[in-house]
Amino acid sequence: MTLTAPLVRPSPYTVIGLDPSLTATGIASSNGWCEVVGHKKPRAKDPGITGLPHPQRREALHELAHAITDTIGRPDLVVIELPAVSRSGGGAHERGWLWWQLYNHLAALEIPIGLLSPNQRALYATGKGNAAKGAVIDAVARRFPTWNTEGDDNAADAVTLMAAGADWLGHPITPMPQTHRAAITKAIWPDTLTGDPS
């Protein structure tokens, strides 16, 4: 028996899902593409952003933020994953800066912003808020095959965020079970972006 992948439903809105990261920011568009953008070390032995001296670190962070915002463009809605405040380890300071830089950029352009926590993102993808990365990747590959994540969890997260945003707008990519859609009611959505886009 051959399974036919669900078609992407046309929508008057362009929605971007954004999963910020220093090394692998996932970006997905409702127009059918996804990318991963991050700081690339020129040589394998070079330090990542958090290991650079502060002047070079500042420059690298600004370059990364510009690369991400250039990729995002000017959509109708951007859905961003909220920072995992319980996450520890190196780079928390830099990740926080990047997250707010991206948020401020979108706000300055008056692009509406939706916010999902990591648990809400996993819930929308799998029906379980504590789902592992592999489960999210598998769920995205099954439900949203148009977006080729190549098994990258950052891209899969971005696709999930984008799909949740499209669903909130009333243009779901594919029908989702109510258990999954519970994530939408728990998320933070803008109070703008009502009616048809101009």
Image (cartoon, rainbow, N blue to C red):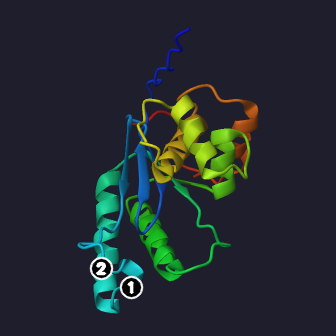
Q: How crowded is mark 1: few (under 14 residues within 10 Å), some or many (20 or more)?
A: few
Q: Is mark 2 on a helix, strand or loop?
A: loop
Q: Which of 56 and 62 is in front in this view?
A: 56
Q: Which mark is residue 154?
A: none
Place of residue 135 in the rendered image (x, y in percent of width and height, measured from the top left): 63, 43
Residue drawn at x 39%, y 65% is 105
Residue drawn at x 38%, y 54% is 36
Quarter of the figure that contains the N terminus = top right
The type of residue carrying mark 1 is: Gly
Residue 88, by quadrant, is bottom right
User: Which residue was labeled with disc 1?
Assistant: 51
The type of residue carrying mark 2 is: Asp
Q: Which of 145 and 68 is in front in this view?
A: 145
* Closer to viewer: mark 2 or mark 1: 2
Quarter of the figure that contains the C terminus = top left
CB under 8 Å between callouts 2 and 1?
A: no
Place of residue 7 in the rendered image (x, y in percent of width and height, measured from the top left): 47, 20
Residue 75 placement, left or right of 120:
left
Image position of 17 with respect to 25: above or below: above
Residues under labels 2 and 1: Cα distance?
9 Å
Residue 85 placement, left or right of 77:
right
Place of residue 180 in the rendered image (x, y in percent of width and height, measured from the top left): 70, 38
Image position of 3 with respect to 170: above or below: above
Q: Earlier in the sequence, mark 2 or mark 1?
A: 2
Is residue 54 among the parts visible in the rendering?
yes
Q: Nearer the viewer, residue 49 or 102?
A: 49
Residue 15, by quadrant, is top left
Q: Is mark 1 on a helix, strand or loop?
A: helix
User: Which residue was labeled with disc 2?
Assistant: 46
Place of residue 184 in the rendered image (x, y in percent of width and height, measured from the top left): 67, 44
Image position of 50 with respect to 165: above or below: below
Q: Residues within 10 Å of mark 2 (few under 14, many from 20)?
A: few
